[in-house]
Image (cartoon, grey):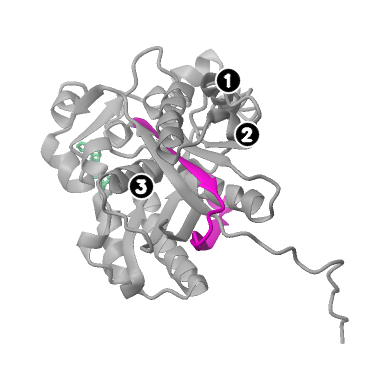
C-alpha cells in the first residue's frame, strides 16, 4: 500500500474574498444590425433570431483595450471608495491586448496611476474574467495581497473580419472591472470550477500573430489575422461545458438551483444562455441578459453585466450569484459568490 503524502505544513488559514466595487465602460459608437445589413449579406431578422443581438458598441479608431479597461477601472475604484495607489495587483483578462507585450495590465497600471501595483494579463479568451477573478481570490485569501483590481477588457472590433458575416455580427467592444478584497461578515466567493480542453484549439482561434504563424503578406491576404470559428461546434461545446461547470460549482458551494438569486452568464448567444438556464432549471427572470445591447464582448461580458445589475440595485447583499463562461482554448469557468 502506498504511503499517504504528508503536507509539509498545515494549510494557512484562508480569508474570505469579496467583490467590493464594480465598474464598466462601453464605447459610444453603436453599430446596429441595420448598419451590418449595409456591410455584409445579412439581416436584422437572421442576427436577432440566431443570436439575440440587436446592436453592439465599437471603440473609436485610437481607443485601445487599455483605455476601455482603465475607464472601467476608474468607475470600479470610485464605486468601492478605493484609491488607485491602494491596489496591490492588477489582473487583466483579454485576448485583444494593446500589444503582445508589455501586458495590457501594465498599460492600465500607468493610465490609472496604480503606482504600487504588480500587473499581468491572463489569456483564457471569453472565460478570462473568471480565470482572473479566481486567481485574484488566491492572492487575497492567502493574505499575500489586500486589494486586487480585476478587469475584463476587449477591442474585438480590431480582430473581426468585417467581410465575414459568420463572425462579424457576433462581437462588440467594452470593459468591466471589479475590486477584490476580504470583507468582514461576507462569505464572498464560495466555490469555483476552471477547466480547459486543449485538444480543440482550432474550433475557435485567432491563428496569426504568434510564433506559430507570424504576420506575413500571405497570412494577411488569407485573413488569418482575424477570429476563425466553427460556430456549430462552439455552440455544442458551450452548452455542455457551461451546464457541467455550473453543476460542479453549485455542488462545491452546497447550493441548489432555488438558492441562486442570479445567474450571470457569458453573453455570446441568447440561445446558449436560454438552453443552459432551462437545463439548470433557473427561471429566465433570474438570468442576467444584455447580449441584445452589446453582443459578445468576450472577457468583458460578465463584469459589464455584473456592474449593470449592481448599479440597477438588482443584486442584494446575501444573494447567491452564479457566473459561468466558455471560450477559446477551449476553456470554461464558473464561480459562485455571495454578494456583499
Ligand atoms: N447572416 C445571414 N446568414 C448567415 C450569417 C449572417 N450573419 N452567418 C451565417 N449565415 C448563414 C450560414 O452561411 C449558413 O448558410 P448555409 O446553410 O447556406 O451554409 C446559415 O446561415 C446557417 O448557419 P448555421 O451555422 O447553421 O447557423 P447557426 O444556427 O449555427 O448559428 C451561430 C450560427 C450564431 C454562429 C451559432 O452557431 C453560435 O452562436 N455559435 C457559437 C458562437 C460563439 O459563441 N462563439 C464564441 C466566440 S468567443 C471568442 O471568439 C473570443
Residue 322 x/y as whole percent: 40, 60
Q: Which stretch appears magenta?
A: 173-202
Tell me the quarter of the picture where residue 280 sits: bottom left
Identify the residue at image location x=31%, y=55%.
315
Image quarter where the C terminus lies is bottom left
Q: 207 left or right of 326?
A: right
Give the mark nearest the N terminus, 2 or 3.
2
- The outermost residue toward the bottom is 1
Q: Which mark is residue 250?
A: none
State yes or no: Cβ of the residue under disc 1 lies below 8 Å from any atom of ligand 1: no
Give the mark nearest the N terminus, 2 or 1.
1
Residue 187 x/y as whole percent: 50, 63
Q: Which residue is mark 1?
A: 110
Question: Contact, CB < 8 Å: mark 3 with mark 1?
Answer: no
Helix, strand or loop at label 1? It is helix
Identify the residue at image location x=37%, y=42%.
301
Q: Nearer the viewer, mark 2 or mark 1?
A: 1
Q: Which mark is residue 120?
A: 2
Q: 24 left or right of 124?
A: left
CA gap, disc 2 and disc 3: 22 Å
What crowding class fits label 1: few (fewer than 14 Cα within 10 Å), some (14-19), or many (20 or more)? Answer: few
CA gap, disc 3 and disc 1: 25 Å
CA gap, disc 2 and disc 1: 13 Å
Q: Does residue 71 sit above or below 128 in this rendering?
A: above
State whether residue 208 appears in this view: yes
What crowding class fits label 2: few (fewer than 14 Cα within 10 Å), some (14-19), or many (20 or more)? Answer: some
Front-most of 107 and 116? 116
Residue 176 x/y as whole percent: 41, 37
Helix, strand or loop at label 3? It is helix
Q: Which mark is residue 306?
A: 3
Q: Nearer the viewer, mark 2 or mark 3?
A: 3
Amino acid at each position: 500500500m502506498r504511503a499517504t503524502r504528508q503536507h509539509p505544513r498545515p494549510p494557512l488559514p484562508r480569508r474570505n474574498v469579496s467583490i467590493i466595487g464594480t465598474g464598466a465602460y462601453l464605447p459610444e459608437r453603436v453599430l446596429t444590425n441595420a448598419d451590418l445589413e449595409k456591410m455584409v449579406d445579412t439581416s436584422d431578422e437572421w442576427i436577432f433570431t440566431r443570436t439575440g443581438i440587436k446592436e453592439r458598441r465599437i471603440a473609436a479608431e485610437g481607443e485601445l483595450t487599455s483605455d476601455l479597461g482603465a475607464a472601467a477601472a476608474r468607475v470600479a475604484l470610485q464605486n468601492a471608495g478605493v484609491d488607485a495607489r491602494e491596489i496591490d495587483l492588477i489582473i487583466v483578462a483579454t485576448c485583444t491586448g494593446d500589444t503582445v507585450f508589455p501586458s495590457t495590465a501594465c498599460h492600465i497600471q500607468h493610465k490609472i496611476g496604480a503606482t504600487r501595483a504588480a500587473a499581468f494579463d491572463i489569456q483564457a479568451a471569453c472565460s478570462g474574467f473568471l480565470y482572473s477573478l479566481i486567481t485574484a481570490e488566491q492572492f487575497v485569501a492567502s493574505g499575500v495581497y489586500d486589494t486586487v483590481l480585476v478587469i475584463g477588457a476587449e477591442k474585438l472590433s480590431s480582430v473581426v473580419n468585417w467581410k465575414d458575416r459568420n463572425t462579424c455580427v457576433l462581437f462588440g467592444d467594452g470593459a468591466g472591472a471589479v475590486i477584490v478584497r476580504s470583507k468582514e461578515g461576507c462569505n464572498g466567493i464560495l466555490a469555483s470550477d476552471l477547466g480547459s480542453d486543449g485538444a480543440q484549439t482550432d474550433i475557435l482561434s485567432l491563428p496569426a500573430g504568434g510564433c506559430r504563424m507570424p504576420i506575413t503578406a500571405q497570412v494577411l491576404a488569407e485573413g488569418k489575422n482575424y477570429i476563425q470559428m466553427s460556430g456549430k461546434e462552439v455552440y455544442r461545446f458551450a452548452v455542455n461545458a457551461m451546464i457541467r461547470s455550473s453543476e460542479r460549482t453549485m455542488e462545491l458551494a452546497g447550493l441548489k438551483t432555488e438558492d441562486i438569486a442570479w445567474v450571470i452568464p457569458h453573453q455570446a448567444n441568447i440561445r446558449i444562455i436560454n438552453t443552459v438556464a432551462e437545463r439548470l432549471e433557473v427561471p429566465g427572470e433570474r438570468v442576467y441578459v444584455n447580449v441584445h445591447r452589446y453582443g459578445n464582448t468576450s472577457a468583458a461580458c460578465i463584469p459589464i453585466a455584473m456592474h449593470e445589475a449592481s448599479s440597477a440595485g438588482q443584486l442584494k447583499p446575501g444573494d447567491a450569484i452564479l457566473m459561468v463562461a466558455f471560450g477559446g482554448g477551449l476553456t470554461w469557468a464558473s464561480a459562485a459568490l455571495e454578494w456583499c
